[in-house]
Amino acid sequence: MLSAKSLFQEMLDDDRSFALFCSIAAGGESQGGWENARIAALAPRAEQALAPKIARHGADEDKHGRIFNALLRKRGLAPVPVPPDTDYTMILERHGIGLAHHRLSSDEPLTVPDIVTYLAHSRVTEQRASEQMRLLRRHFAHHPDLGRAVRMISDDEDNHLAYCHEELLRLARAGHGHTIRTTLRACALAEIRIYRDVSLAVMAHMGRILGWRWARSAALRAGIHAVYGFERLVGWRRMVTLRAPSTPDPLGGHATAAAEFA
């Protein structure tokens, strides 16, 4: 039976597909850690109170990268090269989603509109991350090797999403509502297209590793295109709404450590 759980289980059971899965995840999380660290360092004077939260966001993402690498080490595996067509974070950057890396590599302080762009981009991508980790948590929360990692990362991604909601609402009240709405919509429509393309690429690489038959690969491709069709029609709207988090200041505390996975 072709289900999300069986598909993930098959990828987790094979060393080569597991190494690719963890390497893709670790690379994306580490890249997100670098981006957030640079944004925190370059935060404008008017948003200095936000800088520690951005830094916390980056520290969490960097921690997630270390966790995925630790999961590889536990199985005696090494990271593998990430195929360029599966590099979600870099593809988003190349398509102009979020703040450009050349901008973050400079020492010029960011502006408040830059912070709005960053938060809108994060609100969209953290929606995706939260949903993906909830899916893994639903099926693997009690897995002997993955359970703790999945639960910790899922909690963090939920906090990141809540923080984006809270800060965007604050900036909307400060007069940036129109920019936030237009930026969110543009990011969401671009993200769902890129997510489709990256999903197709990941499934193609996994299919070659696991020796999937043509019919199975075709069914998965059709499913990915169906999800994209739904998201392009109405699903993108879930990525652009804003609501106050149930727990205020979700990134105001201390980051949890990843030492238990070392």
Image: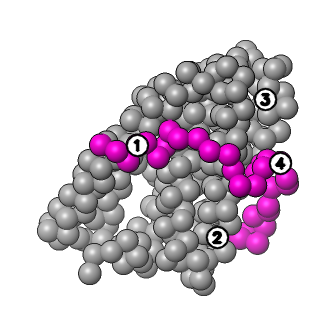
Name the N-terminal-most of marks 1 and 3. 3
Q: Distance between the residues labelled 4 and 3?
A: 17 Å
Q: Nearer the viewer, residue 177 or 117?
A: 177
| Front tag of 3 and 2 | 2
Task: Indicate yes or no whether the magenta region holds residue 168.
Answer: no
| Front tag of 2 and 4 | 4
| Front tag of 1 and 2 | 1
Q: Can residue 170 be seen in this view?
A: yes
Span colored in magenta: 233-262
Disc 3 target residue: 41
Residues at circles 1 and 2 in contact by the CB criterion of under 8 Å: no
Relative side of 215 to 250, left or right: left
Name the N-terminal-most of marks 4 and 3. 3
Name the N-terminal-most of marks 1 and 4. 1
- Would you place residue 200 above or below residue 133 in this image? above
Q: Name which residue type carries label 4.
A: Gly
Q: How far apart are marks 2 and 4 (CA)?
A: 20 Å
| Front tag of 1 and 4 | 1
Q: Distance between the residues labelled 1 and 4?
A: 29 Å
Relative side of 12 to 65, left or right: left
Task: Please give the name of the residue rendered at 57% of the width and 27% of the height, measured from the top-left corner.
Answer: 180
Disc 4 target residue: 252
Name the N-terminal-most of marks 2 and 4. 2
Disc 2 target residue: 151
Q: How far apart are marks 3 and 2 (CA)?
A: 29 Å
Q: How far apart are marks 1 and 3 (CA)?
A: 31 Å
Q: In which quarter of the image is residue 37?
A: top right
Of helix, strand and loop, which one carries label 3?
helix
Of helix, strand and loop, which one carries label 1?
helix
Q: Main secondary structure of the magenta part?
A: loop
Q: Residues within 10 Å of mark 1 (few under 14, many from 20)?
A: many
